[in-house]
Amino acid sequence: MPTPAYVIDEMISAKSIAARVEALAREIQQAFKDTDKLIVIGLLRGSFVFIADLVRELDLPVEVDFLETSSYGEGMESSREVRILKDLRGEIEGRDILVVEDIVDTGHTLHHVLNLLASRKPRRMEVCALLDKPSRREVDVKATWTGFEIPDEFVVGYGIDYAQRDRNLDHIGAVRFIDEDGATPA
Ligand code: IMP
Ligand code: MG
């Protein structure tokens, strides 16, 4: 099925994101100031831009690892069933870990991932999410640090996609569907 036509309305500028990432990194650095090593775990694929910017602001001994879960596929609806597509390469038992997520929406993905990672007994586990849509929550889960709370809109950019597109945008924008005349359908 072809992706319907849409435009992207800027919601968060590249400049605002950069400032917020810097502030988040300062808080994370402070919280983990005594760590021997922080394992920063990016949830693929949406967090790849965020984690790249975030780790470069962290003046800490850091390792980077990735975990991939099943996603929305081509659509906009959460499947609620979360599967691990690619597991971590490294062990996390007894380690300090920071899970980095792009968006917490219904919360099912994060809930599932945190249960899985907690079962491997890290010493300390915290979460940094770039975006949070609290109005969409179905399971009670919250990131330790959140970049921005946003309304219930489907967003793209800064690593986040719609049907694998628009990950390369330097800002975050809301998807707005249009008909052939470029008008917003009722
Ligand atoms: P949850 O399991 O419903 O919390 O969904 C979390 C995942 O859904 C996020 O990691 C995103 O990959 C994806 N997602 C949620 N909202 C959006 C959005 O507005 N745009 C693109 N992907 C989204
Ligand atoms: Mg995701």
Image (tube, rainbow, N blue to C red):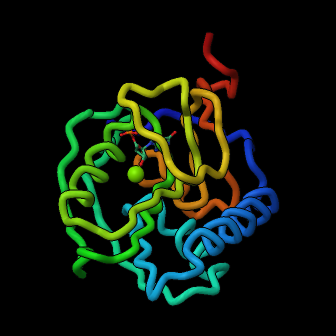
| Quadrant (top left, top right, bottom left, bottom right) of the N terminus | top left
- Taking the view exactly as shown, the residue that stands out farthest to the top is 186
Residue 32 figure quarter: bottom right
Relative image position of residue 17 (x, y in whole percent): 73, 59
Residue at 67% in and 45% down: 148
Relative image position of residue 31 (x, y in whole percent): 59, 68
In the depicted structure, whether residue 100 falls above or below residue 77: below
* Apparent side of residue 39 relative to residue 35 in the rendered image (left or right): left
Tell which of 69 and 166 is nearer to you: 69
* Apparent side of residue 144 relative to residue 97 in the rendered image (left or right): right
Relative image position of residue 93 (x, y in whole percent): 23, 74
Residue at 34% in and 71% down: 66
Whether residue 168 is visible here, answered yes or no, is yes
* Apparent side of residue 90 relative to residue 11 in the rendered image (left or right): left
| Quadrant (top left, top right, bottom left, bottom right) of the C terminus | top right
Whether residue 177 is visible here, answered yes or no, is no
Residue 15 figure quarter: bottom right
In the depicted structure, whether residue 69 falls above or below residue 185: below
Tell which of 56 and 33 is nearer to you: 33
Residue at 62% in and 80% down: 58
Relative image position of residue 145 (x, y in whole percent): 58, 53
Tell which of 38 and 136 is nearer to you: 38
Tell which of 161 and 139 is nearer to you: 139
Residue at 24% in and 50% down: 115
